[in-house]
Image: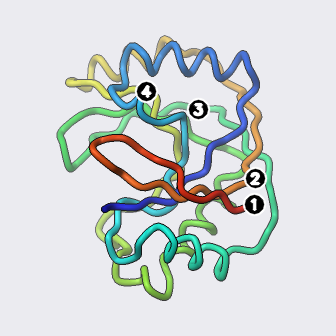
Amino acid sequence: MRVYAVAFPAFADADRARISAIRERFDRLATKILPHVTLVFATEVLDASGLARHIAATVRPAAFECVFRATRVELDPFNGEYCVFLVPAEGAREIVALHDALYTGPLASELRKDLPYHPHVTIARCATEAEARSVADSIGALEMRTWIAHVHVLASVDATFITTDALAL
C-alpha cells in the first residue's frame, strides 16, 4: 500500500467552490481527494502508522497562513499531462520546509533530486499545454487566503485515498 503526507488548505467557502468547479471539470481526481498540497509523495518505505510517527517526530507544531496568488502550467513527467497549479506566494517557504523536513531519516532515500519541489495545489489536468493555459487564463486574478494547520497521512487503496491520521502543526 502506498502512503502520502498532504496538507489540506482551509480555503474560504467561495474559494473552495471556485476550485471545486474547475477541478470537477478538469481533474479526474476531484472526486477522490480534496484540494491539497502534497508533502510526501507515494511511498512504500513506511506504512501509514510509520509515516505518522515520522511526521510526529519530525515536524514542529506551527500552523501558518498560505496565500495563493498565481497559477502555473507544468508538464507532469510521469504521465504527459499538463497540470494547472495554484501557487502560494506567502506560505511557500513553510511548505518547502515541511517537505524537506519529512524527506529525512527513513524517507531520505525517497527524495527526488532530479525533480524540483514546487509547492502547489493541482486544479486541472489537461491533455495539451494549450488547454492547460486556457484553464489557467480563465482563472484570472487570485488572492486565496488559507491556513495550513495539519499534516494528513493518506493511504491509496483501489485508486481511493483514505485518511489514516491527521497531525496538528
Instruction: Name the residue carrying label 2.
Output: 149
Q: Amino acid at mark 3?
A: Ala
Lower sequence index among marks 2 and 3: 3
- Image coordinates for residue 36, horizontal then vertical, percent: 55, 42
Q: Above or below — where is 85 with respect to 168? A: above
Q: CA gap, disc 1 to disc 4?
A: 24 Å
State how many labels appear.
Answer: 4
Secondary element type, mark 2: loop
Q: Are marks 3 and 4 in contact (CB under 8 Å)?
A: no
Q: Residues within 10 Å of mark 4 (few under 14, many from 20)?
A: some
Is residue 102 positioned above or below 73 on the image? below
Disc 1 and disc 2 in contact, CB within 8 angstroms: yes
Mark 1 or mark 4, earlier in chain: 4
User: Which residue corresponds to mark 1?
Assistant: 168
Direction from residue 160 to residue 102 in the image, left or right: right
Which badge, 1 or 2, comes first in the chain's sequence?
A: 2
Look at the numbered discs 4 and 2 and tell me whether their residues touch, using CB distance below 8 Å.
Answer: no
Name the spot of residue 149 as percent of width and height, x first.
75, 52
Residue plotted at (36% across, 41% down):
160
Residue 67 located left or right of residue 21: right
Q: In 3D space, how far apart are the residues under numbered discs 2 and 3 (Cα atoms)? A: 22 Å
Would you name the residue on which mark 4 appears? Answer: 30
Q: Nearer the viewer, residue 114 or 162?
A: 162
Asked which quadrant contains residue 66, the reply is top right
